[in-house]
Amino acid sequence: MDIFTLSYKEPLETIVNMTGNTIDKLNAVFELNQFLKKENQAILKQVMAIFYKEENLIYKQRLNYRIKDLLTPYLSRILIQGIEEGSIDHADAGEAADLIVQLVFSSRDRLIEELMKPERDVKVMNNVVKTYQQCLERMLAVPEGSLKVLSTGYFEDFTEFS
């Protein structure tokens, strides 16, 4: 799993340093996330099947800490830019980044619960993502619909979880 989480590091650095506004950078982070998860869905299925067993929850928690340690600094830097350019209304970029990661974990857990079902409901999964996106947009005080957390049809393409 370290290889997978570390595969984010270089692209995240590129996103943080690219020219563009904060919304563009946040959307680039979401696109990166989609791409890497789609490309690695067979591995993810195996990992999630292990991590989501009750006896292995400590490993899932450790993974959450690693992901948080990886993502929070990059998100903070993007949010600082947004605060400075006036596109994001938030008092503390670090706290906002931490909260975003916590929302990611909560949404991810709900989505994986649905993905692991023999008869998953794509509508439920899309609603989870829509709610997550609305929470982010409201928390950051950005225009509704400006963040693109997932592309249309994303879950339909997750064939390895079928």
Image (cartoon, grey):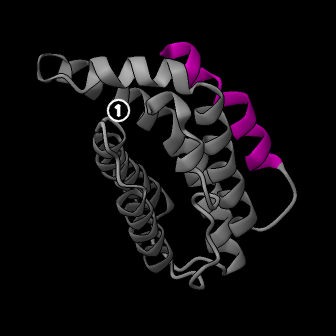
Q: Which residues are magenta?
A: 1-17
Position of residue 11 in the picture relative to residue 45 (left or right) = right
Where is residue 34 drawn, in percent x and y? 62, 44
Q: Residue furthest left?
A: 55
Picture quadrant of residue 47: top left
* Amino acid found under the numbered disc labelled 1: Asn
**Could you say which quadrant of the image residue 19 lies in?**
bottom right
User: At x 62% / y 35%, what residue is drawn?
Assistant: 38
Q: Main secondary structure of the magenta part?
A: helix
Disc 1 crowd rating (10 Å Cα; few below 14, some 14-19, many 20+) is: some
Towards the viewer: 99 or 45: 45
Residue 131 at what x, y percent from top left?
39, 70
| Residue 82, above or below 110 | below
Query: Which of 31 and 122 lies nearest the eye of the viewer?
Result: 122
Residue 161: x and y in percent read 45, 31
Residue located at (60% from left, 85% from top): 143
Which residue is painted at 72% across and 58% down in the image? 25
Residue 42 x, y percent position in the rendering: 53, 21
